[in-house]
Amino acid sequence: MISFFYNLPALGIINSDNTAAAAATATAAASTADTSSSPFGGLSSFGMIAMWVAIIAVFYFVTIRPQSKRDKKLKEMQSSIKTGDNVLTTSGFYGKVADVGDDCFVIEFGTNRGIRIPVRKSDVVGIQTPKMTPSKPESAN
């Protein structure tokens, strides 16, 4: 194909005295010759596949795998909750587990533990006791 562009003056398609047009045609032919081997600027199809595999692997190890580990750990924690454990819900309420069902807990809320509310197991985010330290009153100066 390159030889075709160089032979245009000999074929009579371009006048030999029109050197600007011939130079532009030769430059265009030379620039297409460099990138005609691969549409991706020199990367072979194997190189492109390897690049996509590497991008997907990095995406998996940075985002998907850590999230699945956290989910697995949370499910293990939720399945280990038993009656009498102090828990924290997703809404930020602390309570004590009064009863364990198949898909929910009955949690006692309040200071006198008189309020019992069923809560889905997925809404419990931790087993912990609230840190209730009395605040020091500010002295009036």
Image (spheres, rainbow, N blue to C red):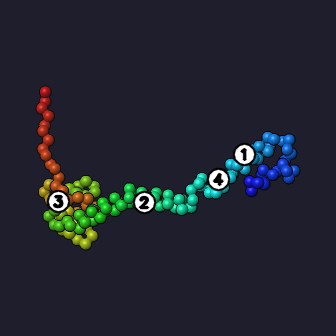
Q: What crowding class fits label 2: few (fewer than 14 Cα within 10 Å), some (14-19), or many (20 or more)?
A: few
Q: Amino acid at mark 4?
A: Thr
Tell me if label 1 and label 4 are in contact, CB under 8 Å. Answer: no
- Between the residue at mark 3 and the residue at mark 4, the CA separation in whole angstroms equals 67 Å
For marks 3 and 4, the one nearer the N-term is 4
Residue 137, image x, y percentages: 13, 37
Q: Of the residues tagged 3 and 4, which is closer to the observer?
A: 4
Tell me if label 1 and label 2 are in contact, CB under 8 Å. Answer: no
Task: Give the structural element (helix, strand or loop) at label 2.
Answer: helix
Report the residue marked by disc 3.
86
Report the residue marked by disc 4.
35
| Residue at x 85% of width, y 52% of height | 11
Q: Amino acid at mark 3?
A: Asn
- Between the residue at mark 3 and the residue at mark 2, the CA separation in whole angstroms equals 40 Å
| Residue at x 16% of width, y 55% of height | 129
Q: Quadrant of the C terminus?
A: top left
Q: Of the residues tagged 4 and 2, which is closer to the observer?
A: 4
Q: What crowding class fits label 1: few (fewer than 14 Cα within 10 Å), some (14-19), or many (20 or more)?
A: few
Disc on res. 27: 1
Report the residue marked by disc 2.
57
Q: Nearer the viewer, residue 25 or 125?
A: 25
| Residue at x 84% of width, y 48% of height | 9
Q: Nearer the viewer, residue 22 or 104?
A: 22
Against 84, is 22 above or below? Answer: above
Instruction: Examine the image and state in which quarter residue 119 appears.
Output: bottom left
Task: Give the structural element (helix, strand or loop) at label 3.
Answer: strand
For marks 3 and 2, the one nearer the N-term is 2
Q: Residue furthest bottom?
A: 102
